[in-house]
Amino acid sequence: MIFSKEKTTLAYTIEKCPKCEKLHKRDFSEGDILFTISSKCTFCDGITTIEKIFGEILER
């Protein structure tokens, strides 16, 4: 097919710190579950939770 485009889906995870309200976008990792404790906040040393998991489709 001459006009078909290859589609790639990239998955991301948004982490939110309840202490400073900062959001951090990172690549999705196997085992990410919504609303679970994720990592240490890089801004205030609070504990972040996973707020959102989503994918973006790229066409080549």
Image (cartoon, helix red, strand yellow):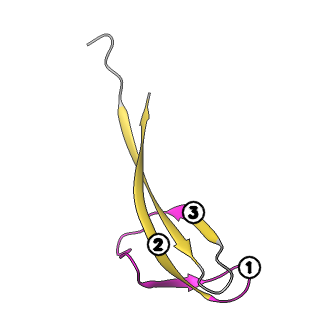
Instruction: Pick out the residue farthest to the top.
Output: 2
Q: Residues within 10 Å of mark 1 (few under 14, many from 20)?
A: few
State the separation of the CA atoms marked 2 and 1.
Answer: 17 Å
Type of secondary structure dominating the magenta stretch: loop
- Which of the labelled discs sits on residue 43, or is there none? 1
Residue 5 image position (x, y, % from top left): 36, 23
Q: Position of residue 14 (x, y in %)?
A: 51, 66
Q: Earlier in the sequence, mark 2 or mark 1?
A: 1
Range of residues picked out in magenta: 26-46
Residue under numbered circle 3: 25
Q: Amino acid at mark 2?
A: Glu
Q: Secondary structure at mark 3?
A: strand
Q: Quadrant of the C terminus?
A: top left
**Side of 18 relative to 55 (left or right):** right
Q: Residue at x 36, y 70 (%)?
A: 30
In the rendered view, would you say 54 is above or below 47?
Answer: above
Q: Amino acid at mark 3?
A: Lys
- Residue that carries the numbered disc 2 in the rendered image: 51
